[in-house]
Image (spheres, helix red, strand yellow):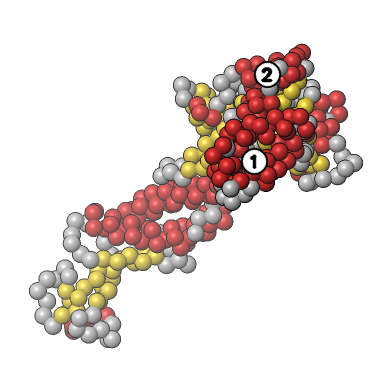
């Protein structure tokens, strides 16, 4: 070792973020093992490296005794005091030794240690960098594809898109540049493993954040999103500025913004809708592009009945129920869709059943306690009237139905 070695370590410390002292400490431990291996003896040794000059010194550690029985491990008190006058019986004496050709062993060991520490530092650095970027979007280049994974070059490291995070109808071509979501970062003994996704709905959110400055600035917010990757996405947005049209801002001039996202998602359809605090309006919006006649709701059970014209029924439901399914997940409500003709043929009891009002009535009656018949009917009728806007005749019919449901309970309450 020499001064040049220390200078090289200092340069590594700056460029690779590898602590010089950590390398020297690791090298000292490795040299102890190298000495014991290459010089085939049982001496207890210690190695120290001067962090200024790079000079290596090897010491044999011996117990200070009155009479030496094991020369490898012991030294007499007289000789020990020649080395250090402060030593006494029972102390450890450090006897400097100069093993033949130890410099060659040290150089090879130092090379291996430095290489390993650089790898460790790079691995830790990459792990820390990508760990902080979890759930972010990143651009990479497709390297190759096998039966299970797509391998993406991220410049500093290679990431993988496992099969469960791939979109079924997407194609991945070598050298193709694509945007991916950093789904998870795992630290392994070899190198960090970067799990990427093209399927996660957060990818679409990040794409909108990239394309729509108003979202980044907080003028427009994304209320919710649901996605069937490769086919269709519904995203609900709202504006904090009444003068800014949230949907128009997301679409962009002549569709430039949303078209850029659709192109990145290889043709996936995107429905951008306005979020509304009025759940009836929100459900109507969520079923876009269908036109909705009316929405009836049961707030307690989050169930709704949507009425549309006959020519809008298939559009509202969507192919294989996709439009209704996405709308239900986006709003968090159960949505039952009927044409106007079907709705007109439903009895009030059937409507209540669709909305879960009959079941709710039974549950409410179980908790009646000492309420009178009049209180029960008043509460029940008020709720029915509020949710369905039904007229007095229907309320009277409902009262008759309730009489049948609560026969014995009502008689006891009357007494």
Crowding near the residue tagged with mark 1, few <14, some 14–19, many ≥20 C-alpha atoms within 10 Å = few
Q: Residue at x 39, y 65 (%)?
A: 49
Sooner in the amino-acid sequence: mark 2 or mark 1? 1
Label of residue 170 in the image: none
Corner quadrant of residue 382 = top right
Corner quadrant of residue 325 = top right
Crowding near the residue tagged with mark 2, few <14, some 14–19, many ≥20 C-alpha atoms within 10 Å = some
Residue 153: % across, % down: 57, 32
Q: Residue furthest front?
A: 415
Q: Residue at x 74, y 15 (%)?
A: 341
Report the side of 149 relative to 98 (left or right).
right
Q: Is residue 247 in view from this perspective?
A: yes
Q: In front: 361, or 120?
A: 361
Q: Residue at x 45, y 66 (%)?
A: 51
Q: Residue furthest top?
A: 311
Q: In front: 271, or 211?
A: 271
Q: Is residue 209 in view from this perspective?
A: no
Residue 158: % across, % down: 53, 35
Q: Residue at x 67, y 46 (%)?
A: 375
- Which residue is labeled 1 in the image? 300
Mark 2 vs mark 1, CA separation in Å: 27 Å
Quarter in which the N terminus is drawn: bottom left
Corner quadrant of residue 72 = bottom left
Q: In front: 321, or 11?
A: 321
- Which residue is labeled 2 in the image? 318
Q: Secondary structure at mark 2?
A: loop
Report the side of 403 relative to 158 (left or right).
right
Residue 190: % across, % down: 42, 42
Count of numbered circles in the view? 2
């Amino acid at each position: 070792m020499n001064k040049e070695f220390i200078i090289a370590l200092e340069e590594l410390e700056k460029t690779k973020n590898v602590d010089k002292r950590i390398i020297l400490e690791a090298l000292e431990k490795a040299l102890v093992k190298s000495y014991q291996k290459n010089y085939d003896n049982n001496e207890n040794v210690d190695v120290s490296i001067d962090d200024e000059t790079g000079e290596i010194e090897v010491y044999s550690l011996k117990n200070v005794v009155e009479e030496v029985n094991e020369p490898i491990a012991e030294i007499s008190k007289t000789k020990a005091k020649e080395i250090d006058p402060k030593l006494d019986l029972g102390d450890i004496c450090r006897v400097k030794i100069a093993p033949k050709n130890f410099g060659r062993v040290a150089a090879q060991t130092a090379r291996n240690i430095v290489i390993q520490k650089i790898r460790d530092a790079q691995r830790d650095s990459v792990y820390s960098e990508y760990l902080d970027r979890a759930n972010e979007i990143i651009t990479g280049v497709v390297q190759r594809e096998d039966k299970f994974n797509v391998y993406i070059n991220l410049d500093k490291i290679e990431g993988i898109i496992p099969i469960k995070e791939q979109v079924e109808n997407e194609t991945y071509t070598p050298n193709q540049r694509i945007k991916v979501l950093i789904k998870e970062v795992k630290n392994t003994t070899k190198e960090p493993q970067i799990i990427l996704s093209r399927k996660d709905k957060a990818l679409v959110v990040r794409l909108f954040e990239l394309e729509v400055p108003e979202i980044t600035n907080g003028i427009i917010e994304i209320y919710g999103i649901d996605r069937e990757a490769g086919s269709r996405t519904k995203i609900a947005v709202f504006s904090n500025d009444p003068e800014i049209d949230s949907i128009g801002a997301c679409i962009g001039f002549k569709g430039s913004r949303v078209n850029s996202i659709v192109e990145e998602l290889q043709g996936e359809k995107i429905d951008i809708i306005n979020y509304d605090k009025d759940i009836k309006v929100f459900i109507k919006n969520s079923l876009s592009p269908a036109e909705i006649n009316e929405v009836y709701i049961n707030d307690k059970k989050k169930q709704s009945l949507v009425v549309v014209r006959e020519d809008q029924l298939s559009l509202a439901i969507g192919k294989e129920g996709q439009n209704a399914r996405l709308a239900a997940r986006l709003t968090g409500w159960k949505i039952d869709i009927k044409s106007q003709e079907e709705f007109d043929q439903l009895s009030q009891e059937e409507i209540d059943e669709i909305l879960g009002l009959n079941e709710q009535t039974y549950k409410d009656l179980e908790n009646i306690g000492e309420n009178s018949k009049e209180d029960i009917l008043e509460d029940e009728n008020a709720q029915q009237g509020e949710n369905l806007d039904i007229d007095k005749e229907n309320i009277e019919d409902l009262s008759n139905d309730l009489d049948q449901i609560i026969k014995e309970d009502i008689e006891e309450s009357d007494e």
